Image (cartoon, grey):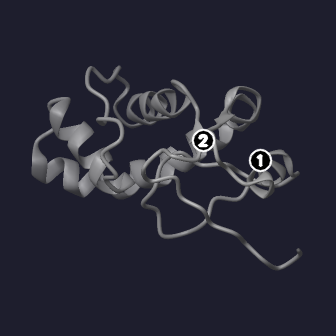
Amino acid sequence: MSGQVLVLWDIDRTLLYVGDIDRQAYRDTYHELTGRSAGTLPKRGTGTTMPLAILRMLVENGIAEDEAASLLPTPVELLPQAQRRRIDDIRRDGVLLPGQSPRWERCMTSRGSCPRSSPGTSSPTHC
């Protein structure tokens, strides 16, 4: 499949359960951006896009809304990087939810694939 990219977002969390791995990626991103620990993380299962989830996380952790909006491009770039750093955890600990196609399982274990748990970026993630 050279030259082809499949992008599949699990917006409603019905494909893959990753436990706290996605939460840790948000924690890592917030810490990398601010040097502090996040007290509040995005709510789970809302279907909110990643940029909106990050914006809310910044504001809910005390960053003024106008400043959070101006900072937003940076964490939008940082979060996929944080997820890529945890790709081995996702492959090891991620659990396909019932009813998923065997093709998705092959995708999960394929070299170069990168399962994602957070939607909303405009470009695919490559691992």
Residue 41 horizontal/vertical position (percent): 31, 30
Looking at the image, residue 124 sits to the left or right of residue 66; the answer is right
Identify residue for label 1.
108
Label 2 sits on what residue type? Leu
The answer to whether the residues at label 2 and label 1 have Cβ atoms under 8 Å apart is yes
Q: Quadrant of the N terminus?
A: bottom right
- At label 2, counting other C-alpha atoms closer than 10 Å, the crowd grade (few under 14, some 14-19, many 20 or more) is many
Q: Can you name the residue that lies furthest to the front here? A: 99
For residue 82, above or below residue 62? below
Question: Residue 70 — which label?
Answer: none
Which is nearer the N-term, disc 2 or disc 1?
A: 2
Secondary structure type for disc 1: helix
Identify residue for label 2.
16
- Residue occupying the point 45% across, 29% down: 23
- Residue occupying the point 78% across, 48% down: 105
For residue 50, above or below residue 33? below
Question: For this rendering, which residue is in front, 44 or 53?
Answer: 44
Label 1 sits on what residue type? Met
